[in-house]
Image (tube, grey):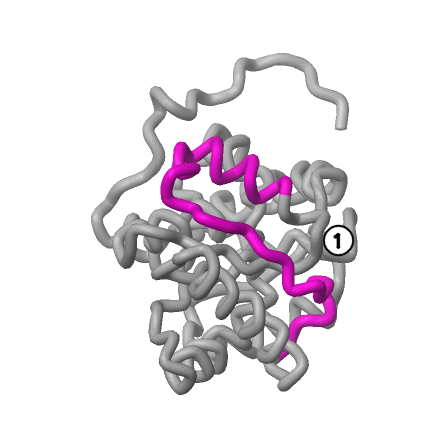
């Protein structure tokens, strides 16, 4: 699992959250943005993610998971690798489509909203995603504190009650620690809709692909043509 952030604090939080999955190795980029919250961050992180993905295949891993809702470097990594590559945004939205008809996404800051709309449009899910709301918390502010839970609950409740969402997708893998607590808060408030944790969704999809011996189509993701490339 590759984190697109250079923040060591964020990386350690993800490692703690995934202690129940000892077969998942959590690594992060060494150069690039501290966190990914806009198109520019996405662009800066992508080359380093692709390099780590290639290394993961060389080192014998069965699959690569990109821990970011924006799916940075997802398509390039699929071109480069012959093992399955999944990412948080695509995986969680695909899963959400099997849980309900109207999807509400709760993300971090306003800068992230247009990026997520672009992702949704690229997946052809505009008719399923009823809203993308920002909780006004930066990626590095997220944890399982009451402040985080309350901010997420406020936006999730609004997208359920005002926008008609029947599934909530968390629009940042930094929200993984808060997912179960948000689910409990919604259920106790009689807003009992499923909450999709994007990081777990991406990992579970990768596991499924490995078990089914499936990987990305070589027709959809052809190997890059041989040429000189200066990094």
**Residue 18 coordinates in the image, percent (x, y):** 49, 73
Q: Is residue 171 left or right of residue 134?
A: left
Q: Is residue 59 visible?
A: no
Name which residue lies at 73% across and 63% down: 138
Q: Is residue 171 left or right of residue 40?
A: left
Name which residue lies at 24% across and 54% down: 211
**Residue 146 coordinates in the image, percent (x, y):** 63, 85
Q: Quadrant of residue 42?
A: top right
**Residue 10 coordinates in the image, percent (x, y):** 68, 68
Image height check: is 125 above or below 104? above
Q: What quarter of the picture does the C terminus occupy?
A: top right
**Residue 228 coordinates in the image, percent (x, y):** 68, 15
Name which residue lies at 54% across and 57% down: 171
Q: Nearer the viewer, residue 177 or 205?
A: 177
The residue pinned by badge 1 equals 30
Image height check: is 224 above or below 115? above
Q: Is residue 35 left or right of residue 78?
A: right
Name which residue lies at 62% across and 13% down: 227
Image height check: is 6 above or below 43? below
- Residue 85 on the magenta span: no
Q: Nearer the viewer, residue 219 or 137?
A: 137
Residue density around tag 1, few if under 14, some if 14–19, many if 20 or more, within 10 Å: some
- Residue 120 on the magenta span: yes
Q: Nearer the viewer, residue 97 or 175?
A: 97
Which residue in the rendered view is the most extreme toward the left?
212
User: Which range is magenta?
Assistant: 114-143
């Amino acid at each position: 699992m590759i984190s697109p952030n250079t923040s060591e604090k964020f990386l350690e939080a993800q490692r703690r959250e995934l202690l129940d999955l000892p077969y998942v190795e959590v690594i992060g980029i060494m150069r690039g943005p501290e966190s990914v919250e806009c198109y520019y961050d996405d662009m800066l992180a992508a080359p380093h993610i692709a390099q780590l993905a290639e290394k993961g295949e060389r080192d014998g891993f069965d699959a690569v998971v990109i821990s970011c809702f924006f799916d940075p470097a997802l398509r390039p990594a699929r071109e480069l690798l012959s093992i399955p590559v999944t990412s948080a945004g695509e995986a969680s939205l695909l899963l959400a489509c099997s849980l309900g008809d109207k999807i509400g996404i709760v993300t971090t800051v306003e800068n992230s909203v247009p990026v997520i709309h672009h992702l949704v449009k690229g997946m052809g899910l505009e008719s399923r995603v009823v809203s993308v709301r920002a909780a006004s918390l930066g990626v590095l502010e997220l944890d399982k504190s009451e402040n985080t839970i309350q901010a997420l609950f406020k936006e999730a409740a609004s997208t359920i009650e005002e926008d008609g969402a029947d599934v909530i997708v968390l629009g940042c893998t930094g929200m993984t620690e808060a997912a179960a607590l948000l689910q409990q808060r919604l259920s106790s408030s009689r807003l009992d809709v499923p909450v999709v944790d994007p990081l777990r969704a991406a990992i579970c999809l990768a596991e499924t692909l490995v078990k089914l011996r499936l990987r990305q189509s070589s027709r959809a993701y052809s190997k890059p043509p041989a040429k000189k490339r200066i990094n």
